[in-house]
Image: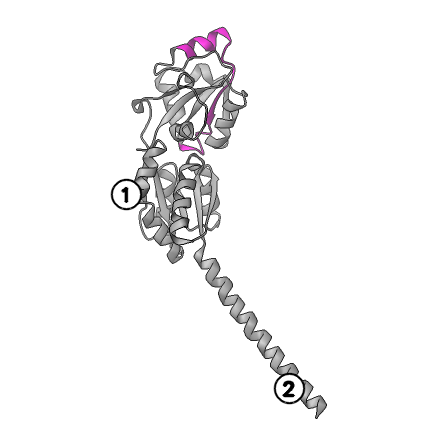
Amino acid sequence: MWCAGNQLQYLVSRSFIKVLICVLGVVNLQAHAQSISVAAAANLNGVLEAIVQQYKKQTGVDIKLVYGSSGHFYQQITQGAKFDIFLSANEEFVDRLVTQGVSSSSGVVYARGRLVVLVSKKSKIRPSADMQDIKQALGDGRLTKFAIANPALAPYGLAAKQSLEQLGLAQFIQPRLVLGGDVGQTMLFIKSEAAQAGMVPWSMIKTTPNLKEEEYFLIPEKLHQPILQKMLLFKDANSQARLFYEYLQTEKTRTIWRQYGYE
């Protein structure tokens, strides 16, 4: 009888453990389903943090943000990387993904970005719309390094390249160009004095403290193609991601976009 009782107790305990494992598994799956994975262009660091903070305060939903160049994300996604939402710094990379059938919609333009020419703290260069002093600095030795994001990977880098071409500076600056992997690295080149000047998103100026007005100048949009930033919700995105995707299009978030230099 003692052995039979022990065996029964063992079987009951084993069954309980199995049930507990199943319950915990369901809980973990539910917790995972509540999280949202977002691939975001590097220029969104700052504004997206503000939006996510507000959204999480309202809903409690966890959102994982991964920043990088739009071109790199496009390559990763085509190679199988999984995200719920992709916020690109242009339309092209999203449109390419749409043609590959990764989404049931064509995506949404969520903001229009602006480009700024920025000089480093120790630089003696004065930024302006016509870039006149930068032209002179190329000749007198004040400008030896000029930073932009890689045009092949970063839409803001492409806009910078187009602007330099329109201003007739491309061939002169080419030997002095320093290419950042994304706009975040480009900004770091200028802030660290590795480059005396460069071109970065207006939104990054908005999130950088202690910048003086004479250190930057907003570049006229006529010098480059419009920087229309587009986002995409993937087919297998969970229900929480769909709600956040809709939230990004509300008037409440548009107010935040504007505060950070987007139109």
- Residue designated by label 1: 251
In screen coordinates, is 148 left or right of 7? left
Taking depth in this image into account, of 114 and 153 the one nearest to the observer is 114
Q: Position of residue 172 (x, y in %)?
A: 45, 14
Disc 2 crowd, CA 10 A, few/some/many (<14, 14-19, 20+): few
Q: Residue furthest front?
A: 57
On-image quarter of the N terminus: bottom right
Residue type at the position of mark 2: Leu
Element carrying mark 1:
helix
- Is residue 144 one of those drawn in magenta? yes
Q: Nearer the viewer, residue 205 or 159?
A: 205
Label 2 sits on a secondary structure element that is helix
Position of residue 125 relative to residue 179, above or below, is above
Left or right: 177 in relation to 105: right
What is the magenta range? Answer: 133-155
Residue 8 badge: 2
